């Protein structure tokens, strides 16, 4: 939560009361325990931030957006309802709280303060990229969010900043991150960097972080491009400096060690094994394309075939994630990728009349063993959006793609007329912070109806209730 809370156990309260009665047993060697430090170093704090934000990026919201865009189907219990857009703030309280609290913005700011004190500009730049990813994702999910007043212990009830302002502020954080990283000054996170490894502040390692920062800049410009088309040129400029090689993708760290497993593995194979299955629309699309990622994404079901569940049918016999690949305990989920980077650039090029858009599309297709295509006009734009939809499998960014383009143009589940483009603020925040908007829509303020691929009347999930 964004409010600043101090919670004491009964034992701690009793200890404080006793300490108030006497100064017996105090002093440098008596009142401090070197084995129990009162503050964590930036290295240890980074561990917590990475673990928390890996869960935020690949947990409840990623599953919800995957169902809303019909990559998945909710097949049991509350996920049968969630698939049909029946949710409350309770469903996403944990995600909202951990955006700010332990492992979120509060700790990220502590890391930055410690890095500044140590004049470790590489570490500072890494922490700023984490801030941009964390807050930019929150603005993507919820639109208006606390930011300028967030993580400030003197402000109990921070105001909600407009989505466009948050993205603009995040762009400045990324500019600072890139500048700090490019100094190549300081030790950097070293072995505590779970993204790009233990190479410290080596130029190669630092430049991977720089490229990821540029791709994030392109992402957040793209998220606002439908409302402000001047952002397409910015997308092209930033993506051209972003991640260009899939080997440098920004991925979670996971292993088969208990507590380090892939969140999707934990959910589907250990905790909620009947709740979610492959979506019929997505499976049929991959089959129609003869896309080799079909069996990377999903496992054959009891009939020996990859089968998607019909929306709303609750078919638990449909295919699960492939437990050997995308659903494996040790699978490192992609969060910021070369494929997203090039496909954003392709989309932006198309929107600005750059005929080389097709080249970026075909480069990505080639990475997955798909033949090049020769397309122009609206068919090219749809092919780019389709490739983005697949490349963003299991990724929160699939929702801004849908909000921006109306791809995939799927029919809402359960006879509704609008597919949600956001979820509700966490209930803890709504209950504790009076600045939380009382009325929440199923879309964010900067979403438009219809997208770039379809007229509003033809976009089946956005035509009604749009801003």
Image (cartoon, helix red, strand yellow):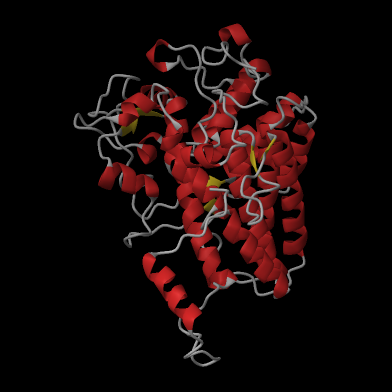
Residue at the location (56% across, 51% down)? Answer: 100
Residue 135 horizontal side relative to residue 55, left or right: right
The location of residue 340, given as percent across then percent down, is 59, 39
Query: How many numbered circles does the render carry?
Result: 0
Return the residue nearer the eye: 33 or 319.
Answer: 33
Return the residue nearer the eye: 358 or 209.
Answer: 209
Relative to 237, say whether 106 is above or below: below
Residue at the location (62% across, 37% down)? Answer: 435
Query: Where, by quadrant of the figure, is residue 404 drawn?
Result: top right
Q: Residue lying at the far front in this picture: please name it.
A: 21
Residue 467 horizontal side relative to residue 176, left or right: left
Relative to 442, say whether 142 is above or below: below
The location of residue 459, given as percent across then percent down, is 56, 12
Residue at the location (32% across, 33% down)? Answer: 276
Residue at the location (64% across, 70% down)? Answer: 188
Q: Residue lying at the far top in this picture: please name it.
A: 457
Query: Where, by quadrant of the figure, is residue 330 drawn?
Result: bottom left
Return the residue nearer the eye: 116 or 349.
Answer: 116
Quarter placement of the C terminus: top right
Relative to 45, say whether 138 is above or below: above
The location of residue 278, given as percent across then percent down, is 34, 30
Q: Is residue 82 visible?
A: yes
Return the residue nearer the eye: 183 or 87.
Answer: 87
The location of residue 14, given as percent across then percent down, is 40, 72
Q: Is residue 205 visible?
A: no
Query: Where, by quadrant of the figure, is residue 260 drawn?
Result: bottom left
């Amino acid at each position: 939560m964004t409010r600043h809370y101090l919670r004491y156990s009964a034992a701690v309260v009793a200890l404080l009361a006793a300490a108030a009665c006497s100064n017996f047993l105090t002093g440098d060697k008596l009142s401090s325990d070197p084995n129990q430090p009162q503050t964590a170093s930036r290295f240890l704090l980074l561990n917590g931030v990475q673990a928390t934000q890996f869960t935020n990026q690949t947990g409840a919201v990623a599953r919800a957006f995957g169902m809303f865009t019909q990559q998945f189907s909710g097949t049991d219990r509350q996920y049968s309802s969630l698939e049909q857009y029946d949710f409350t703030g309770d469903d996403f309280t944990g995600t909202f709280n951990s955006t700010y609290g332990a492992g979120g913005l509060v700790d990220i700011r502590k890391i930055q303060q410690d890095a500044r004190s140590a004049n470790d500009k590489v570490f500072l730049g890494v922490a700023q990229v984490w801030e941009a990813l964390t807050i930019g994702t929150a603005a993507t999910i919820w639109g208006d969010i606390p930011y300028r007043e967030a993580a400030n212990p003197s402000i109990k009830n921070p105001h909600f900043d407009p989505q466009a302002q948050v993205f603009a502020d995040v762009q400045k954080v990324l500019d600072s991150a890139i500048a700090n990283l490019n100094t190549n000054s300081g030790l950097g996170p070293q072995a505590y960097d779970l993204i790009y490894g233990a190479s410290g502040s080596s130029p190669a390692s630092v430049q991977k972080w720089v490229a990821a920062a540029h791709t994030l800049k392109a992402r957040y410009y793209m998220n606002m491009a439908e409302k402000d088309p001047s952002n397409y040129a910015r997308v092209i400029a930033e993506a051209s400096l972003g991640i260009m090689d899939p080997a440098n993708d920004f991925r979670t760290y996971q292993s088969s060690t208990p507590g380090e497993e892939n969140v999707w593995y934990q959910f589907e194979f250990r905790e909620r094994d009947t709740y979610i299955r492959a979506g019929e629309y997505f499976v049929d699309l991959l089959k129609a394309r003869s896309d080799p990622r079909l069996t990377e994404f999903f496992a054959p079901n009891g009939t020996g075939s990859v089968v998607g569940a019909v929306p709303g049918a609750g078919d638990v016999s449909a295919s699960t994630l492939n437990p050997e690949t995308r659903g494996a305990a040790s699978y490192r989920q992609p969060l910021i990728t070369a494929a997203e980077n090039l496909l954003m650039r392709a989309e932006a090029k198309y929107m600005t009349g750059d005929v080389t858009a097709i080249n970026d599309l075909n480069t990505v297709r080639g990475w997955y063993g798909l033949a090049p295509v020769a397309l122009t006009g609206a068919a090219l734009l749809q092919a780019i959006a389709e490739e983005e939809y697949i490349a963003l499998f299991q990724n929160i960014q699939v929702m801004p793609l849908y909000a921006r383009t109306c791809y995939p143009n799927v029919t809402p589940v359960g006879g509704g007329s609008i597919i949600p483009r956001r979820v509700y603020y966490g209930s803890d925040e709504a209950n504790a912070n009076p600045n939380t908007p009382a009325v929440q829509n199923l879309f964010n303020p900067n979403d438009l109806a219809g997208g770039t691929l379809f007229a509003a009347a033809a976009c089946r999930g956005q035509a009604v209730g749009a801003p």
